[in-house]
């Protein structure tokens, strides 16, 4: 999959980032809310939204370059619905950042895979929930298998398959992960959440499947581990220092910064006005939601700073410019 040079280059950026606490490690950039699927559990996508204009997205990428962000994850909705998605990947790469993409995989073709490869895509994550489609999800292994085989043959970028324990029988998740590893991909497992976003308890069979999948994940970098989920499933809480808003944050289709995918509207500052001062504040601010947080990217991006202190009171100044900017903004969500 990814070349050794790509791996060394990205590892070097991550290591360099570890010595610079005010440098964002991961940023999610939403390029559209539109999706070609309609999964029953999804609250983030729709079937009608227009793609974000490429000029706006390039301005966002330019500002992320000024903030020295390392990994830029292009996401949605379904990002492959953006008509200029290859140009966006190439632009991220041209600004010295590492382009990553999340997709459901249904719109992948050999031509598009080659184009993304040539544009410099580093990694692609595909969500696969079950073996076969059901009333809740179409993100399933059987219809996607030809796409995955095509990726295995033609993609030089890294591919990771994410499956969710709880979207189907536990054995489905294990079989999906085994198929991913057999194709040369990374395999990862997320745990199902309830309506409050909390990780649901694991049954004995689900725990066995989870343990088996963790043993399969030999190729994924250790900093992408999701072992925190087991603490959440066992006790409902996990002890860690959340650096969302600093090491990781999301930029929605309106160009607003959110601490993470679960903190819509906080702080709600336009990316163009988001500065290193905001990053410093977010880095040193504890969040009361962290004990029950199941946002994997927030945990992963915060891991390199586990040894650093975090002294500020919860969100004491994250809303520092809220009163200033909200007067200028349209409603956050339509």
Image: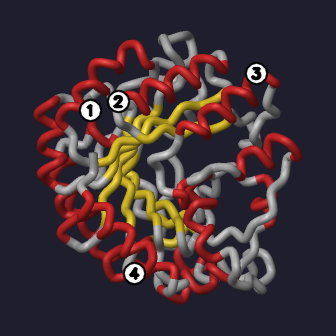
Mark 4 / mark 1, whichever is N-terminal:
4
Q: Would residue 109 be found to the left or right of residue 6 on screen?
A: left
Residue 23, given in percent of the width and then of the height, sits at: 47, 80
- 149 vs 88: above or below: above
Q: Is residue 49 left or right of residue 220?
A: left
What is the tally of numbered marks visible in this picture?
4
* Dot placed on the residue nearer the N-terminal end, 3 or 4: 4
Q: Position of residue 299 (x, y in %)?
A: 63, 60
Seen at 22% across and 27% down, the residue is: 150
Residue identified by numbered label 1? 152
Badge 1 vs badge 2, beta-carbon distance below 8 Å: yes
| Residue 32 shows in this picture | no
Which label belongs to residue 67?
Answer: 4
What residue sits right under mark 2 in the picture?
Answer: 183
Sequence-first disc among 3 and 2? 2
Q: Are marks 3 and 4 in contact (CB under 8 Å)?
A: no
| Labels 3 & 1 near each other (Cβ < 8 A) | no
Q: Nearer the viewer, mark 3 or mark 4?
A: 3
Q: Which mark is residue 23?
A: none
**Label 1 crowd bin: few (<14), some (14–19), many (20+), radius 10 Å:** some
Other-residue count near label 2 (Cα within 10 Å), few / some / many at <14 / 14–19 / ≥20 = some
Other residues around mark 3 within 10 Å, as few (<14) / some (14–19) / many (≥20): few
Q: Viewer-proximal residue, 315 or 204?
A: 204
Q: Which mark is residue 205?
A: 3
Disc 2/disc 4 C-alpha distance (Å)? 36 Å
What colour scheme has been applied to the protein in the rendered image?
A: secondary structure
| Residue in the image at 15% along x and 54% along y | 119
Please name the residue shown 35% across and 27% down the image.
Answer: 36
* Alpha carbon separation for disc pair 3 and 1: 30 Å
């Amino acid at each position: 999959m990814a070349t050794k040079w790509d791996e060394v280059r990205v590892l070097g950026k991550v290591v360099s980032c570890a010595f610079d606490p005010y440098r964002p490690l991961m940023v999610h950039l939403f390029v559209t809310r539109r999706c070609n699927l309609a999964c029953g559990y999804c609250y983030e996508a729709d079937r009608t939204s227009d793609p974000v204009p490429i000029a706006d997205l390039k301005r966002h990428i330019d500002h992320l370059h000024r903030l020295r962000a390392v990994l830029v994850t292009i996401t949605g909705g379904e990002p492959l619905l953006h008509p200029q998605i290859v140009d966006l990947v190439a632009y991220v790469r041209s600004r010295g950042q590492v382009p990553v993409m999340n997709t459901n995989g249904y719109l992948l073709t050999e031509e598009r895979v080659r184009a993304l490869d040539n544009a410099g895509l580093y990694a692609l994550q595909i969500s696969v929930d079950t073996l076969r489609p059901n009333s809740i999800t179409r993100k399933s292994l059987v219809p996607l298998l030809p796409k995955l085989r095509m990726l295995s043959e033609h993609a030089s970028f890294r591919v990771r398959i994410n499956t969710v324990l709880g979207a189907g029988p536990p054995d489905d998740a294990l079989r999906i992960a085994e198929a991913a590893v057999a194709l040369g991909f990374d395999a990862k497992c997320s745990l199902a959440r309830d309506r409050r976003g909390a990780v649901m308890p694991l049954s004995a069979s689900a725990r066995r499947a989870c343990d088996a999948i963790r043993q399969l994940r030999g190729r994924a970098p250790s900093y992408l581990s999701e072992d925190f989920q087991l603490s959440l499933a066992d006790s409902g809480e996990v002890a860690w220092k959340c650096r969302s808003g600093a090491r990781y944050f999301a930029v929605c289709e309106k160009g607003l910064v959110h601490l993470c995918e679960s903190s819509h509207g906080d702080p709600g500052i336009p990316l163009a006005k988001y500065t290193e001062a905001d990053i410093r504040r977010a880095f040193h601010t504890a969040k009361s939601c962290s004990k029950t947080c199941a946002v994997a990217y927030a945990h992963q991006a915060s891991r390199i700073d586990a040894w650093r202190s975090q002294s500020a009171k919860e969100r004491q100044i994250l809303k520092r410019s809220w009163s200033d900017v909200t007067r200028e903004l349209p409603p956050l969500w339509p």
